[in-house]
Image: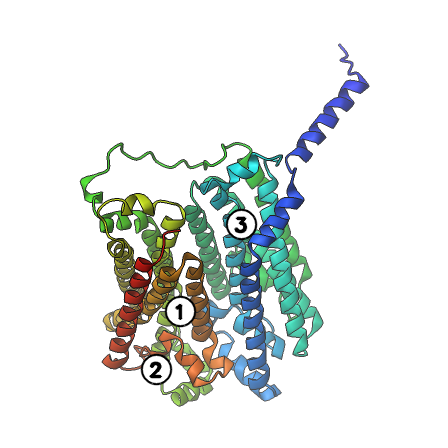
Amino acid sequence: MTTLVRPDVESAGTSAAGDHRSASFTGLPQLVRLVLRRDRVRLVLWVGGIVGLVVATAASIVGLYDTPEDLERYARLVRGNTALIVQAGPGYGLDDPTTGAVVMNEMGIWTLVAAALMSVFMVVRHTRTEEETERAEMIRALPVGRHAQLAAAMIGVTIANVLVATGVAISLMAYDLAAAGSVAYSLSLIGVGSVFAGGAAVASQVASGSRTALALGGAAIAASFVLRAIGDVNESVLTWLSPLGWGQGIRAYADERWWVLVLPVLATVGLLAAAVGLQARRDLGAGLLPERAGPSVAAPRLSTPGALAWRLQRGAMFGWMTGIGLLAFFYGIVADQAESILEDNPEMEDFLAQLGEGSILDAFLSTAVLMLALIATGFTIASVLRLRSEELAGRVEPVLATPTPRWRWAVSHLAVAVAGTVVLMLVTGALTGLGLALASGDTSTFWPIVGASSAMVPAMLVLAGVALLSYGVSPRWALVSWGGFAYTLVIGLLGSALDLPQWALNVSPFTHVPAMPAAGFTWTPMVVLLTVAVLLGAAGVRAFERRDIS
């Protein structure tokens, strides 16, 4: 039997389907403008910070390595060194080193990570957070398509990545670096940022809360970093399973491989298709992983502000502990190979001697502990700023309506942040020491590494005090603490390369922490840092008591 279809019916069905697809994105231009307006300050900070990092690094590298001999000396130091490959990458172009290749080795991976973080934060903010705060319902009450907000968030983050890439390309070419390499790296920034933006879009459909979505996005970045590191060290296929590996795999300033750009494009398209499909299958405000229903009556143990603060933050703390713990264990394993630097790079021994450091192993462990502490400080600040989230969500008023004083509520969250920071650094030190002990068979370094990790706590608490003080003044000012965090990251990662004046280095509390185990322990800076942290915290609590609740 032959089935006949009237042409006018087929045309009408096709037209209806097209209208339905277009209706899903109704209001998109207006929402894009809204995204850009709401993020105008954040965009300036993100773009300025990432481009500024590139400018500072390029300026220092051009000044330090201005002769072929200097470039070759740097290349001998880095080539084939497992410990440095883990932190920086495979070192493309260092067989015949150029200034561009050195710049990429110094800051390439970290700029990619920064672009990935910016993309994750931005997408989650304009998707899952909007639903969590119920602003999405207000917007959807207007003639707005189902997928318009997700599309607007992706367009907004793409604009942000393009701005970063443009600034980076112009900055690199301003220092007379090859145009091809500058453009290649800039395009890789857009590609990597887009992939993690697509991943954040999927996480926002799966998770029921913004914190869970951010945790999933952060875990994806961490996993990508570890895969890239293992793949680069072993020269295995694992590198090609990592978007960060794709970003470096374009080989900027080292015989560029333009075809690598196809990988992030395909991955982004696939992730966005998955996000749209998942969004069409869930209710507004709900995630595919629904939140577990709580008991009708709270347990007696939640009757105090401290217990409530712990209950609210325990998931985040365990998540941070897992992620940083795995990274710390990995650092401990590769630390055993740091001694190989002396065999192939005798000038490294002279360099460390000039810095007054100990052995190569101690110097690597000092650097690893500092980097892990800088990352863990993100938990410290986020834990303190849970106060801001609770206030803006309107959940603090029912608590303060009870006989609970303001100072007790604020101190309860601060206590969780302090205790969490201490436990996090103890676990970090223990897993780093365990990894080194398993790799080398020598357990004598275990407790010195734990001590070095614990010594970072006072500096981290100073930034916790800054976060509490900025929040105490006003929830709007709480973002200042993240600016301080970014500053300490730059100083910690690139302070020596940037050739900054000593006063600029001293602003970072980590500058005053003894570089254990390469250096000896001293009490004075620890006491000073703890005193500063206590004063900042007290001032923050006092400021919070004197202002109105938002």
Q: Residue furthest left?
A: 300
Alpha carbon of mark 3 to alpha carbon of mark 2: how far? Answer: 44 Å
Q: Amino acid at mark 1?
A: Met
* Circle nearer the viewer, 2 or 1: 1
Which element type, helix, strand or loop, lies under badge 1? helix
Disc 3 designates what residue? 123
Residue appearing at x 80%, y 19% in the figure: 8
Q: Residue at x 47, y 63 (%)?
A: 229
Dot 2 falls on a residue whose secondary structure is loop
Mark 2 or mark 1: name the one nearer the start of the chain.
2
x%, y% of residue 321?
33, 56
Front label number (3 vs 1): 3
| Residue 125 versus residue 84 in the image, above or below | above
At label 1, counting other C-alpha atoms closer than 10 Å, the crowd grade (few under 14, some 14-19, many 20 or more) is some
Relative image position of residue 365 (x, y in whole percent):
35, 73
Asked whether residue 425 is in view, the answer is: yes
Res 65 → quadrant: bottom right
**Callout 3–callout 2 Cβ contact below 8 Å:** no
Which residue is denoted by mark 1 in the rendering? Answer: 371
**Numbered badge on residue 26:** none
